[in-house]
Image (cartoon, coloured by chain):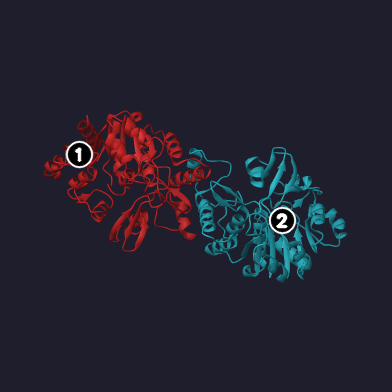
Chain colours: A red, B cyan
Amino acid sequence: MVVVLAGGVGAAKFIEGVVQVVPPAQLTAIVNTGDDFVLHGLQIAPDLDIVTCTLADLIDRQQGWGIAGDTTNCMEWLVRLGGPSWFKLGDRDLAIHLRRTAMRQAGHTLSDIADHFRQVFGVAVHILPMSDDPAPTHILTAAGEVHFETYFVERHAQDDVYGVRLHAAGPARPAPGVLAAIAAAEVVLVAPSNPIVSIGPILALPGVREALKSTTARVVAVSPIVGGVALKGPAVPLLRATGHEVSALGVARAYADFLDGMVIDQVDAALAPAIAALGLRVAVTDTIMRGPGEKAHLATTALALAR
Amino acid sequence: MVVVLAGGVGAAKFIEGVVQVVPPAQLTAIVNTGDDFVLHGLQIAPDLDIVTCTLADLIDRQQGWGIAGDTTNCMEWLVRLGGPSWFKLGDRDLAIHLRRTAMRQAGHTLSDIADHFRQVFGVAVHILPMSDDPAPTHILTAAGEVHFETYFVERHAQDDVYGVRLHAAGPARPAPGVLAAIAAAEVVLVAPSNPIVSIGPILALPGVREALKSTTARVVAVSPIVGGVALKGPAVPLLRATGHEVSALGVARAYADFLDGMVIDQVDAALAPAIAALGLRVAVTDTIMRGPGEKAHLATTALALAR
């Protein structure tokens, strides 16, 4: 069994590589829910949807999110009727949020719903939300404390960041199966996702960091920082604001207490000795996932480092 | 000022006639909300939407409800994800329900929202929901007590009906402006809507029947029963189950305590003396609204009877 700790777009692409070399049914993705929020009264779970719809090959590959070929007729009228316009919702996409909201109101957990959706969409990979409890990530900015999606999408990550508040709604527990999956895994892979707001919320759940330290699995991360920049999203300001060096070495240090190995990009080869000095195995390769070949290569590299 | 007591499709077409002969801004529609219900977590108000979207010329004229040219991409995925399929929701249509639900959750009343929507859609007629309180109409059937929309749409009006329970959620008050509009009107028209489940819920609100009796306005109804049948919807079984004769005379008797006049179809001309014997003026004409000409003619006839 292989476990992947996952955020959104980068994680989804990485898992597409892993399923080329590991049978999907032997793979469990533990997905960040810190980005989840309510808009138009709907419960939106961006990372769960990105992972599920990417693995179902329904995703809009240009954007990395949303449904390929979706229409936006509902959204256009929502805006016409005075609704917020900053978060784009396609008509088919909307069905996912509507159904999730209705099922939550009917008493189903986020875990149940995530499992139902991945089965409907024919995804064999097990998809676990990190928690069934609300665990919103707040960003402390010059404009005040705001939800991550407000900071990132509504305000275009333009505010100065002073800090990050994880699980801002109060204590959140790992979803059923999360700790057991980590304990039972042969390999745990940390996807090339934002260490602060994608992987961070998972690591902050009670018991998760301890499970990662005590598991017999090898734990290998893929650096989301390449040449000092993030391939996608606001990792740079968020790493900086939380006191981390913005580099693969900074990420390695953040994970060092539970990590066995790290895959870094060839442009960061010079950082390999410093990462190795943390007691980690290091693999240096091309980590940019342009297509299926690169995705499979990256997965193979990470798994080889673990085994 | 002219007030129309309104249900859904029949009322909307009738009001389209009235606005041809009365300036729309001098017209107030008091609309049944007994059909309102929650589906997919959304607050749906069928009659309000039918009236508003018909007057905005957005309605699907074939169906009498829904938005012309709308897509159903969200609905198809909702059903795929296990959602109920019996109530069709177009993508643009859905925006109305989503926005209404979000605005209700934000503390706006149904009245506020109805007024906002009609302004966005450029409708000059004042549109008042009969009540801002939940006032669901339940139908007592062989299959149990069910919401009107369940009886009518989900179960295709096929169950034997034993009775009707109005305001099944408990006491409902008239929305702000309802009693005042009736009191201040020169003419009150009762649209050719279902007397039991469209007009009945309005009449059952505390003070409405009294306001109709005490207003100085002439009150004129258009019979929704023509030749012993309803042009649309389940008026026949509902009239029967509530002890009314299924005829224009039966409708006249149900309204007789507040009515001054009644417009009946030419096929029911033989009922005119019996209706007149109730103390009512009677106009006999073609009441079938095939197009704009017939709608205007029917409105003119009703207004002439009142004046």
A285 or B73, which lies in front?
A: A285
Residue A37 horizontal side relative to residue B183, left or right:
left
Tell me what residue is drawn at x 38 percent, y 38 percent.
A128
Q: Which numbered circle lies on residue B199?
A: 2
Residue A291 horizontal side relative to residue B61, left or right:
left
Count neighbours of disc 2 (C-alpha within 10 A) and say few if under 14, some if 14 to 19, many if 20 or more: many
* Residue B186 shows in this picture: yes
Tell me what residue is drawn at x 49 percent, y 46 percent.
A101
Chain of the residue under the numbered disc 2 shown in the image: B
Q: Which numbered circle lies on residue B215?
A: none
Residue B301, located in which quarter of the rendered image?
bottom right
Residue B280 in the image: state x and y as whole percent: 83, 62
Secondary element at image label 2: loop
Judge whether B197 appears above or below B219 on screen: above
* Residue A15 shows in this picture: no
Judge whether B261 appears above or below A280 on screen: below
* Amino acid type of the residue tagged 2 in the rendering: Ile
* Amino acid type of the residue tagged 1 in the rendering: Val
Secondary element at image label 1: strand
* Quadrant location, the C terminus of chain A: top left
Residue A138, located in which quarter of the rendered image?
bottom left
B248 or A27, which lies in front?
A: A27
Residue B248 in the image: state x and y as whole percent: 80, 53
Judge whether A211 appears above or below B201 on screen: above
Tell me what residue is drawn at x 79 percent, y 48 percent.
B246
Residue that mark 1 sits on? A263
Residue B157, located in which quarter of the rendered image?
top right
Residue B295 horizontal side relative to residue B277, left or right:
left
Q: State how far apart marks 1 and 2 are (Cα).
A: 71 Å
Residue A268 in the image: state x and y as whole percent: 15, 45
Count neighbours of disc 1 (C-alpha within 10 A) and say few if under 14, some if 14 to 19, many if 20 or more: many
